[in-house]
Amino acid sequence: MRKRTKARELALQLLYQADVTKTSAKELLKDFFNLNANKDEDPAVKDFATALVTSVCDYLSAIDEKISQCATNWQLNRMAAVDRNILRLAGFELLFREDIPPKVAINEAVELAKKYGDLESGKFVNGILDKINKTKNQAV
């Protein structure tokens, strides 16, 4: 698995844990890489995952607003927690990371949705992220 793909997967796990436990992702981040499963992770993977989680937290309200705007007939709090956090992660990359091509951000998110979500998660995530990408330069 590529380093950034692994980092996105770890970031998703952390964001999901924070969302489900109603705990700050930044607080969870302090101990996340000390867990046995993540202890020997490549420093580049740790750094990118940490940057993603921190940035998603910093821009959460703007990301959530854009997701809500683009998720027609869906309320953010009614989405599956996995899908919601995949959308937040990829939404951040689409809206605030010009160094990551939109196609890459969307593809990585769809693959995460297929791996961790239900049967329709990939399509659901793809549709909303495509709309975010097409409207990202419009006001949130």
Image: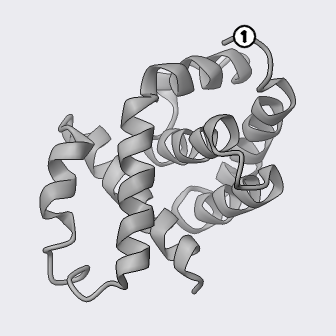
Q: Relative to residue 23, is residue 78 drawn left or right?
A: right
Q: Relative to residue 95, is residue 33 drawn left or right?
A: left
The residue drawn where x is 63% and y is 21% is 66
The residue drawn where x is 42% and y is 75% is 45
Q: Where is 84 relative to 104, above or below?
A: above
Q: Position of residue 9 (x, y in %)?
A: 47, 67
Q: Position of residue 79 (x, y in %)?
A: 52, 32
Q: Position of residue 23 (x, y in %)?
A: 18, 38
Q: Where is 82 relative to 8, above or below?
A: above
> In the rendered structure, which amino acid carries the disc numbered 1?
Ala
* Snapshot colouring: one colour
Q: Nearer the viewer, residue 133 or 71?
A: 133
Q: Nearer the viewer, residue 99 or 103?
A: 99
Q: Nearer the viewer, residue 125 or 35?
A: 35
Q: Relative to residue 110, is residue 9 drawn left or right?
A: left
Q: How many marks?
A: 1
Q: Quadrant of residue 60?
A: top left
The residue drawn where x is 66% and y is 34% is 95
Q: Position of residue 58 (x, y in %)?
A: 38, 32
How packed mark 1 is, by other alpha carbons closer than 10 Å (few <14, some 14-19, many 20 or more), is few
Name the element at disc 1.
Answer: loop
Q: Quadrant of residue 73?
A: top right
Instruction: Return the residue found at the far top.
Output: 139
Q: Where is 130 relative to 65, above or below?
A: below
Instruction: Return the residue found at the far front.
Output: 99
The residue drawn where x is 77% and y is 26% is 136
What is the quadrant of the N terminus in the image? bottom right
Q: Where is 43 relative to 52, above or below?
A: below
Write down the residue under mark 1: 139
What is the quadrant of the C terminus in the image? top right
